[in-house]
Amino acid sequence: MERGSGQCEAARLEQLLIKTSRTFALSIPLLPEPTRREVTVAYLLFRVADTLEDATRWDSERQLAELHRFAAVLRRPTADGARRLAQQWSDDPPLDNPDYLELLTHLAAVLAAHEQLDSEARELVCEHTLRTVDRMAAFVRRTRPLQLHDLRELQDYCYAVAGIVGEMLTELFLLGRPALAPIARDLRDGAARFGEALQLVNILKDSATDADEGRRYLPNGVDRSEVFDLARGDLDSAGHYVRTLQQAGAPRGVVAFTALPVLLAWRTLECVERLGPGAKLTRAEVAGIVHGLDTALDSGQPAVPLV
């Protein structure tokens, strides 16, 4: 591929990232290469799966069929196959969000970027994306609208859509960094809870909007305070994960990438608990958190302090 073409494709992926994730658009650019590229591609593939799983305009039979087609094209990618699938999604879109729909139209470009990753990273991203697609399909098969019944089911759902992401990120952090081998077991033990923490905060924040769209992730009969307590426990674990990376001498970008979502999630959780669902941090608050993280890293302080 020519240099100009590669730069153009990288810019396209960056724009898709910015349009589909507020938090990860801030944190992924902090990563060193090649991890930044690997995580960008992985995030976009997971977002495609999320979009199909969230498809409010399709029935469950159609959702299952499209998740299966996405998995098939990921296992055996071809440009023509990806373009045909993207065209089908464009002709009969799964939902109304224009940014997510734009990502679907660029499926071929995302898969091409995936194919250009180093073989180990490519296999890791593919394996974990297929794992989450499989688990998403299990929830799609349930009666719609989706209603989770207890904390165990809520945790199972969080694992399907976010815990697996934490496990994949951990493997990408370890890839090509033998200095992190001594903490590999500790990181793997905390990886799923890291993802669960961020997902629980999102569920609490978006619960009103989700309910309006027919999704009820907060179980009936479970006091909301129990979910807040679970989120706090997971965020404590996520903080330990970040400090483990930092103490082991992980690259600054890896530490910053993992720390920033945790810091944002803590502040968001406090905001939602005080103001209710839908509460969001202001741009000034986010900027302050980013500045505080930079200051902590510059001075050798813990990126995520003990709570």
Image (cartoon, rainbow, N blue to C red):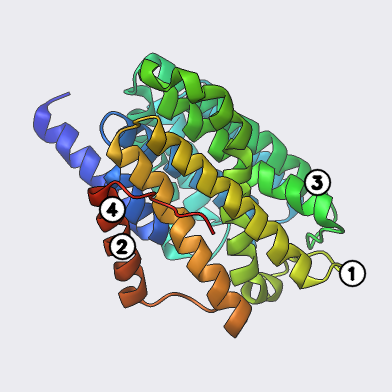
Against 87, residue 261 (above or below) is below
Mark 1 burial class by Cα count in 10 Å: few <14, some 14-19, many 20+:
few
Q: Nearer the viewer, mark 2 or mark 4?
A: 2
Q: Secondary structure at mark 3?
A: loop
Q: Position of residue 153 (x, y in %)?
A: 81, 50
Q: Which residue is mark 2?
A: 292
Q: Count all numbered tags in the image, as a single digit.
A: 4
Could you tell whether 239 is left or right of 274 in the image?
Answer: left
Residue sitting at x 38%, y 38%: 246
> Cα distance, mark 1 to mark 2?
39 Å
First in sequence: mark 4 vs mark 1: 4
Q: Amino acid at mark 2?
A: Gly
Q: Amino acid at mark 3?
A: Arg
Q: Which residue is mark 1?
A: 221
Mark 2 burial class by Cα count in 10 Å: few <14, some 14-19, many 20+:
some
Mark 4 burial class by Cα count in 10 Å: few <14, some 14-19, many 20+:
few
First in sequence: mark 1 vs mark 3: 3
Q: Secondary structure at mark 4?
A: helix
Q: Which residue is mark 4?
A: 15
Residue 293 - label: none
Q: Which residue is mark 3?
A: 141
First in sequence: mark 4 vs mark 3: 4
Mark 3 burial class by Cα count in 10 Å: few <14, some 14-19, many 20+:
few
> Cα distance, mark 2 to mark 3?
44 Å
Q: Amino acid at mark 4?
A: Gln
First in sequence: mark 2 vs mark 3: 3
Could you tell whether 157 is left or right of 48 in the image?
Answer: right
Q: Are marks 2 and 3 in contact (CB under 8 Å)?
A: no
Residue sitting at x 76%, y 71%: 224
